[in-house]
Amino acid sequence: MFFDEIQSCIPAIQSLHLFYEKMPDLHLIAAGSLLEFALAEITYFGVGGVRSVFMYPLSFNEFLLANNGTGLLQITQKASPQMPLNNAIHEKLLKYFKKFLIFGVMPEVTANYLETNDFNSSLQILDDLIFSFYDDFAKYKKRVPISRIRDVFNAVVMQARGKFIYSKVVNNENHRQIKEALDLLIRAGLVIPVVHTAANGLSLGAEVNQKKQKMLLFDTGIFLRILGLNIGKILISEEFDTINKSSIAEMFAGLEILKYKSCYTNENLHYWHREAKNSNAELDYLFAKNCEIYPIEIKAGTRGSMQSMKLFLKEKNRKIGIRISSENFAEYKNIRVYPLYAIDNIING
């Protein structure tokens, strides 16, 4: 049994644990838009009778499969820094990657493009989705004013390059109200926080600083549409300067890291930043695997000195660093390079 749009009926949400108790053989799935907003209004949910599955929109691998790229995916999954791809295959995958950034992660947009091959109509669907999200905010105006949720949503886009600063959302407004709006968007999965950690050891969450957070929008396509960037330029350009300036490569990488982890755990993203006089250093993400911490640096292009990476490896006594860029797979001493389209290879390879 499938309960769709269950957020429209609070009693239905509260009844889920009763199905578990009285009809344990029934497979019951409940889903809905901005469902977490509704869950925040419920005092009792039935602990132990409901399993949460943390789902995300399309990953790049799924986008590739939708484009009949099964062969490309299989080849990519066998590649590694020690065994790079053929350059022609690498360039072909980069073209798919740029399309994925533009159309984003919403299945309807991808499906429309595959069916019609109409670039403009697919972008129109993105615009429609943006307006529908704004309209959905109105359902929760009892807790936070609609305008405040919209302000915070747009602020996440505008502050994508660095630490999220509450005072830059709306001047002279109540920070508590802004924080509540941000928490709602995070619970809804529309905004993904990246929290600073000192990263002196496992677990990464043991040394977080909640006052230092970056915010990611859940969809690169919607992000680009709100920013109003030149989509055509991204498609035809051989360089990734536009992508780099908008921090979209960093956003894409963070979202991909989450998508390839277990759907039964609500994973967090972490970054590292050292502020010192004349010596600031920052790494986009930190990833823990097999009891090791791996620093990750994102570069949209193929250039970069990686000074922050070298500093982190030295200070934290770590052996391996990971660079994610538009380069082919490669290895430079203790730095392993993965293409932007191959983040699954890092998480599950």
Image: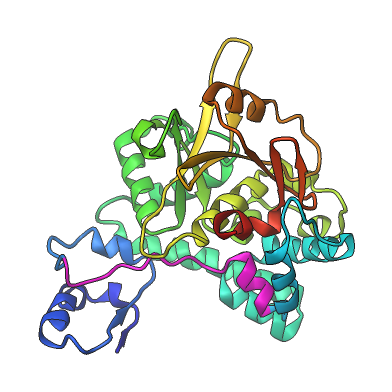
Picture colour scheme: rainbow
**Which residue is located at x 52 percent, y 68 percent?**
57
Report the predominant secondary structure element of the magenta stretch.
loop
Is residue 50 on the magenta stretch? yes
**Residue 307 in picture, x, y percent from top left:** 69, 25
**Against 31, is 192 above or below?**
above
Task: Tell which of 278 and 150 is nearer to you.
Answer: 278
**Against 163, is 298 above or below?**
below
In the picture, the quarter occupied by the N terminus is bottom left
**Against 217, is 61 above or below?**
below
**Residue 125 in picture, x, y percent from top left:** 61, 73
The range drawn in magenta is 48-66
**Which residue is located at x 78 percent, y 64 percent?**
93
Task: Tell which of 191 and 155 is nearer to you.
Answer: 191
Q: Is residue 193 left or right of residue 187?
A: right
**Which residue is located at x 69 percent, y 62 percent?**
102
